[in-house]
Structures are given as structure tokens and as C-alpha cells.
Amino acid sequence: MKKVLICTTAIVCLLAVFAFSADKTGVPPTKGVFPKTATMNARGRVVEISEKAVRIERSIKGRTEIMEFALESPAADIVVNDSIKIDYTVKDGKLTASRIAGLKEKRTYRKDGSRPTKEKPAPLHKSNARRCL
């Protein structure tokens, strides 16, 4: 009688383990959590700008292409021929700009476009130090 009771208890426990493990096989679904969309960026020169959209021209590996972005909010202080950087995402098949920043132009100091070089000081050798004293 004892053996039958122990075997029955063991079988019930074994079935309970299988039942509890079947419930936890997958990750519980999350409600209200949306996957994060990738933010990309582009740099280029403004060709056309309005309150709702901006078109830029950019060069990649010698190719020039024009990209059009829908604006979430109007861009301030951006005019045609400005160099800009746009952070954007793809929403409903359209490129939507979330942030627009103007880029600083490279400064040239001479008419020929070259920058002046800084002169390096002469190295201080022991022989030069004795002459100064």
C-alpha cells in the first residue's frame, strides 16, 4: 500500500512539473512597448526649403543625389545653399527629419585657399643655450 501511494505521488509531481514548464516556454508579450526606430543622418547642401519639406543635394563616392525630407517642425535660420546635417527616420515610407543643424564652413585664410602654416620654434640645444648666456 505504501509503494502505491509513493508511486502515485511521484507521478502527480512529475505531471505538475511538465504543466508548469509548458507555460514558461516563450517570452511574455509586452503591451504598449514599440520597437525603437533607427535614426539615420545625412549631410548636404540645401536646394529647396519650405515649412513642410526640405530638399538637399549630397555627394557620395562621386555621385550626386537629391534627397527630400518631411519636417516635423519648421527649420529656423536655414536658407538655400547652406550646408546642413539632418537626423531622420523612415515613417510610413517617407523620410522625416527630426533635427536639422547647420554646419560651419571651412575657413580659408588666403586668396589661393591654402591655410597659413605655423612656424615651429627653433630647437633648443645645449650649444645654443651657452651662447645665450
Image (tube, helix red, strand yellow):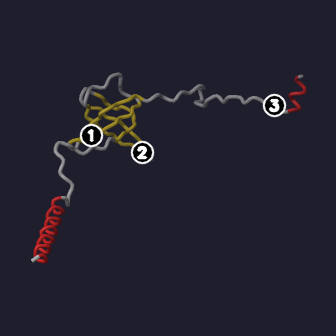
Q: Earlier in the sequence, mark 3 or mark 2?
A: 2
Q: Position of residue 45 (x, y in %)?
A: 39, 33
Element marked by disc 1? strand
Residue matched to label 3: 124
Determine the image quadrant of residue 1. Answer: bottom left
Q: What is the C-alpha distance between the residues marked 3 and 1?
A: 59 Å
Q: Earlier in the sequence, mark 2 or mark 1?
A: 2
How many numbered markers are drawn?
3
Residue at 15% x, 59% y: name it. Answer: 23
| Label 2 vs label 1, nearer the camera | 1
Determine the image quadrant of residue 15. Answer: bottom left
Residue matched to label 1: 95
Residue at 60% x, 29% y: name it. Answer: 112
Label 1 CA crowd tier, 10 Å (few <14, some 14–19, many 20+): some
| Label 3 vs label 1, nearer the camera | 3
Determine the image quadrant of residue 32. Answer: top left
Residue at 20% x, 43% y: name it. Answer: 33
Element marked by disc 2? strand
Relative to 76, is 8 above or below? Answer: below
Mark 3 residue type: Leu
Mark 2 residue type: Ile
Which mark is on residue 60?
Answer: 2
Residue at 60% x, 31% y: name it. Answer: 114
